[in-house]
Image (cartoon, rainbow, N blue to C red):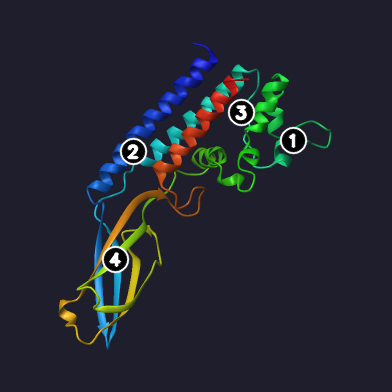
Amino acid sequence: MSTLDDAFARFNRAQEHLATLHAETAAFLAADGYKISIEPSLKGQTYRCSVFGVRAKPVGGAWPLLIGEFLYNLRACLDYIAGGLNGRNFPIDASCQEYFAMNARGSFVGGFAQTLGMGGPIQAAIEALQPYNVTPITPRADPLWLLEALRNIDTHGHLHVIAGAITDSAWRVVPSGAIADGKITIPQSALGDRTEILRFKGRMLPEYDPARVKVEFNTTTHVVFGPGQAGEGQDVIELLEKISARVRGVAEALKEV
C-alpha cells in the first residue's frame, strides 16, 4: 500500500468509529437515557415549576474511547497525506503568526516547517487550508482546529468528558390561558445525575382551579462535549461529522494540486 492508500484506510476506519458512536448515542437517547421530572409549586397567584433532568441510564463508558480513536485516525490521515507529499506532518494553526513562526536563528519552527520538502504549489495549498484562512474571524471554531485541539486533549490530557444536554424546549399550559406572563429560564444545559434544567414562572389566573392546571414541556436531549474542553456544549455527532467533512475537503483540495 502507498502512503495515500494508508491515509484513506485511516479515514475509512474513522468513519466506522463514527458510525458505531452514532448508533450507540442514538440508542441511548431513544431509550430515554434521561427522564424529565417536573416539580410545580403555587404561592399566592405565582406559579413556579422546576424541571429536572434525571439520568436513568449510564452514559456510554466506551464513547470517549471511540471519539479518541476517531480523532486519531483522522489526524493520522492528514499526516499520511503530508508524508506522501514529502512533508513531515500536516500543520494546523489558528494564526498566520503561528504558521510562519521562526526561532532566533531565522529557522521556521511553526506549521510551515512541517511542509519543507514539498513543492511550492502544495505548500501554498496547505497554507490556504489553514483555519485562519478558511474561517478567519473564528479560526478556533474551525473543525480542522477542533480536530487538533480535541486530539491533543485525548493524547496528552484525559479522555473526553461526555454529557447529556437539553438544547431546546417548548412548553404549553393546560388548560390554555390558565397562566399569564409565563417565562422560562435555563440555569443549566449539561445534565448530571439530577440537574435542574428549566425554571418556569407565571401568574395563575384566579378563575382556574390550580389542581387542574399543569405545564407540559417538550424537550430535546443531545449528547454533547462536557465543560472545560474544546467543543464544549456542542453535539458530539454533529461536531465529529463536521470534522470528518473538513478532513475530506482537505484531501480533495490537495488531490487537485
Q: For the residue marked with disc 1, what is the amino acid?
A: Phe
Distance between the Cα atoms at labels 2 and 3?
27 Å
Q: Secondary structure at mark 4?
A: strand
Q: Quadrant of residue 236?
A: top left
Marks 2 and 4 sit apart, C-alpha to C-alpha, by 28 Å
Residue at image mark 2: 22
In terms of secondary structure, where does tag 1 sit?
loop
The answer to which of marks 1 and 4 sits earlier in the sequence is 1
Amino acid type at circle 3 is Phe
Q: Separation of disc 4 and disc 3 at Cα?
A: 48 Å
Residue behind mark 1: 100
The residue at 71%/29% (across/down) is 113
N-terminal of the pair, mark 4 or mark 3, is 3
Query: Upstream in the sequence, badge 2 or badge 4?
Result: 2
Spatial CA distance of label 2 from label 1 is 38 Å
Q: Going from the N terminus, do you reach mark 3 or mark 1 first?
A: 3
Position in image of residue 158 (x %, y %) = 48, 44
Q: Which residue is mark 4?
A: 171
